[in-house]
Amino acid sequence: MPTFDCFPLLPLEVRQRIWELAMEPRQIVYGEEPPAYRQCP
């Protein structure tokens, strides 16, 4: 994977925006979903 050695020299706002765009959104699941056969119609 190529590297960009000047990244630390970029302004903080630019680095933060790059990180925001590069990271995939996370989905957090609380608890477990009931099996399909136990769900009500």
Image (cartoon, grey):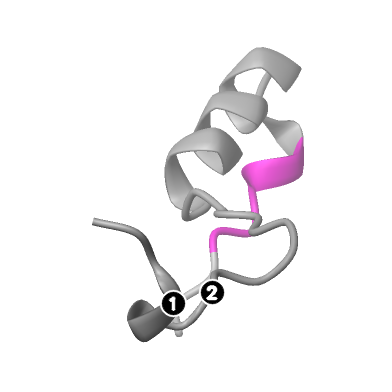
Magenta segment, prevailing SS (helix, strand or loop): loop
Does the magenta portion include 11? no
Per the rendered image, the range of residues in magenta is 4-8
Residues packed near mark 1 inside 10 Å, few (<14), some (14 to 19) or many (20 plus): few
Q: Residue beneath label 1, please?
A: 38
Quarter of the image for the N terminus: give it: bottom left
Q: Residue at x 55, y 35 (%)?
A: 20
Q: Quadrant of residue 28?
A: bottom right
Label 1: state its secondary structure.
helix
Q: Amino acid at mark 1?
A: Arg
How far apart are labels 2 and 1 at the CA level?
A: 6 Å
Horizontal side of 25 relative to 13 (left or right) equals left
Q: Residue at x 54, y 59 (%)?
A: 4
Residue 21, horizontal then vertical, whole percent: 43, 38
Residue for point 44% across, 77% down: 38
- Secondary structure state at the residue bearing disc 2: loop
24 relative position to 41: left or right: right
The residue at which mark 2 appears reads as: 34
* Label disc, if present, on residue 26 of the rendered structure: none
x, y percentage for residue 5?
64, 58
In the image, 28: left or right of 35?
right
37 and 6: which is toward the camera: 37
Q: 35 and 22: which one is in front? A: 35
Residue 33 placement: quadrant = bottom right
* Residue 16 percent coordinates (x, y): 66, 28
Report if the CB atoms under discs 2 and 1 are less than 8 Å apart: yes
